[in-house]
């Protein structure tokens, strides 16, 4: 959705000048375009969910806003007219969830899911976010994608040949079932295509492919199809041809980070530096890391700030409750690194860590709509408090000290700070990195 584009602004001015699209009425004399858009609104709404900012726009009982599996709507326990908007469940003074209220209204299980939703101190607006993979799968099943075959039928494309393999016309069936590139990708992620039932209709064949798989396999297949379509668009519109390894790596990384299963993957397209390096001149380098316990939903942020001489300026460990996954834990740690830098009065900083997803989102100019969007926005919002800020992704080898502080942080139930010193457990490692990082030995 692009609310600032010309078309969106014209529609808003004409049909919902004081409201929003999802609540706008069709009106008495709508244009064909507006009537068609409104006709598809219910389908769109079914495939969208809210990212909570301040909670003002989201209805507790009717909207889809709960994280995790299912429709995202709450299961009513003790509905009360005193509480209608999600903002009613947020303590305005502390910017935290009203746990007792939520527990009495929705029960313990739904409380646990709600507590994993991060609340940013900047209190951004709530955002309605489409489930892009679900929408894409619906389009694939119904052949509603703008493949070159479909575009040629509408006289919108001249050459319908598949830009990926250059062997056949690019239909939905070809792109997601016949294309050799697709076969290679799916085979590499452990989802080889079946050769059975090819004479059936496309929708029936696709349904049989998913019916014969467990839920995890279905998620991987859906993610793979999304990556294949993304790769097609990148090649067709930008002329960028990705290698099979790149697409497979993206699928695995996306699945691991979004659904938080298995171990975090090692990324081969990152900095090749072998260890921590000291910052330039007056820059303070702040390394961050996060440990995450899936059983307790607890995480610990581990942070250390050092100058160009490798001397420790500050360090801290910060425990968190109700963290949904490793990605959330790392975003929390990055935000805490920014907060510590502010509290210490640093002006020129480099925030460095091995949290690829968080760093990538912070360096992107695009608006983030993921489950950590509120944290990403808050981190970006704090950039103006400094003279100079940079974000850098490094491999785990260059983030050893922050990672090693995990055991120290696990000893405490409350945040711990060290000024111009470090925990005893990592002293030796800090000295080693100072020698190698500053002297280059």
Image (cartoon, helix red, strand yellow):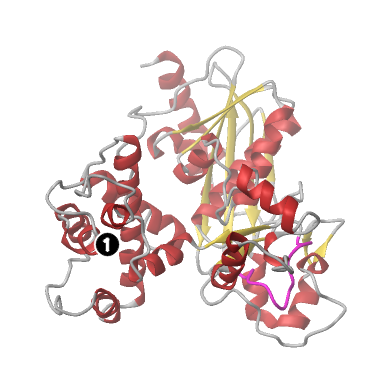
| Number of callouts | 1
From this view, report whether residue 26 is shown above or below residue 316.
below
Displayed quadrant of residue 146: bottom left
In the image, 159 versus 86, the foreground residue is 159
Q: Quadrant of residue 365?
A: top right
For the residue labelled by badge 1, is the local secondary structure a helix, a strand or a loop?
Answer: helix
**In this picture, residue 31 sits left or right of residue 365:** right
Q: Report x, y in % for residue 289.
A: 52, 43
- Whether residue 63 is in magenta: the answer is yes
Judged by its main secondary structure, the magenta piece is loop
Question: Which image quarter holds the C terminus?
Answer: top left
In the image, is residue 252 part of the stretch drawn in magenta?
no
In this rendering, position of residue 441 left or right of residue 410: left
Viewer-proximal residue among 48 and 139: 139
User: What span is colored magenta in the figure?
Assistant: 55-66
Whether residue 269 sits left or right of residue 73 in the image: it is: left
- Of residues 406 and 256, the one nearer the viewer is 256
Where residue 64 sits in the image (x, y, percent)? 63, 71
Provide residue 172's location: percent of width, then percent of height.
27, 62
Residues packed near mark 1 inside 10 Å, few (<14), some (14 to 19) or many (20 plus): many
- Picture layout, residue 398 above or below residue 103: above
Residue occupied by mark 1: 172
Q: Is residue 402 visible?
A: yes
In this view, the residue farthest toward the bottom is: 77
Q: Which residue is drawn at the image coordinates 73% and 74% (left, top)?
A: 60
Which of the 4 image quadrants contains residue 91?
bottom right
Q: Where 439 falls versus 226 (above or below)?
A: above
């Amino acid at each position: 959705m692009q609310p600032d584009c010309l078309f969106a602004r014209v529609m808003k001015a004409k049909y919902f000048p004081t409201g929003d699209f999802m609540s706008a009425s069709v009106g008495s004399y709508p244009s064909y375009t507006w009537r068609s858009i409104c006709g598809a609104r219910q389908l769109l709404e079914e495939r969208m969910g809210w990212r909570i900012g301040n909670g003002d726009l989201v209805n507790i009982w009717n909207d889809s806003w709960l994280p995790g599996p299912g429709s995202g709507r709450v299961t009513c326990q003790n509905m009360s007219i005193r509480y209608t908007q999600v903002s009613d469940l947020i303590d305005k003074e502390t910017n935290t969830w009203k746990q007792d209220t939520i527990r009495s209204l929705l029960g313990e299980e739904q409380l646990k899911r709600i507590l994993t939703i991060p609340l940013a101190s900047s209190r951004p607006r709530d955002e309605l976010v489409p489930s892009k993979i679900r929408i894409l799968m619906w389009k694939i099943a119904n052949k509603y994608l703008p493949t070159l075959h479909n575009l040629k039928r509408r006289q919108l494309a001249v050459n319908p040949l598949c830009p990926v393999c250059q062997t056949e016309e690019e239909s939905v069936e070809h792109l997601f079932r016949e294309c050799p590139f697709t076969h290679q990708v799916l085979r590499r992620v452990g989802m080889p295509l079946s050769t059975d039932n090819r004479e059936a209709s496309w929708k029936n064949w696709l349904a049989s492919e998913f019916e014969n798989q467990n839920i995890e396999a279905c998620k991987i297949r859906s993610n793979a199809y999304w990556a294949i379509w993304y790769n097609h668009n990148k090649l067709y519109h930008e002329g960028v041809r990705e290698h099979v390894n790149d697409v497979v790596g993206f699928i695995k990384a996306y699945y691991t980070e979004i659904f938080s299963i298995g171990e975090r993957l090692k990324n081969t397209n990152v900095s090749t530096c072998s260890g921590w390096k000291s910052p330039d001149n007056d820059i303070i380098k702040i390394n961050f890391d996060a440990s995450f316990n899936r059983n307790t939903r607890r995480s610990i942020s581990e942070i250390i700030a050092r100058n160009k001489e490798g001397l420790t300026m500050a360090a801290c460990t910060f425990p968190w409750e109700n963290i949904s996954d490793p990605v959330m834990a790392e975003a929390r740690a990055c935000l805490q690194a920014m907060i510590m830098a502010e509290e210490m009065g640093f002006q020129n900083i480099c925030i460095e860590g091995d949290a690829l997803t968080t760093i990538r989102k912070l360096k992107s100019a695009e608006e983030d709509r993921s489950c950590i969007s509120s944290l990403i926005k808050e981190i970006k919002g704090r950039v103006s408090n400094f003279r100079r800020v940079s974000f850098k992704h490094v491999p785990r080898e260059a983030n050893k000290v922050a990672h090693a502080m995990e055991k120290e942080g696990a000893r405490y139930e409350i945040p711990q700070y060290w000024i111009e010193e470090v925990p005893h457990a990592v002293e030796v490692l800090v000295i080693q990195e100072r020698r190698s990082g500053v002297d280059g030995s």
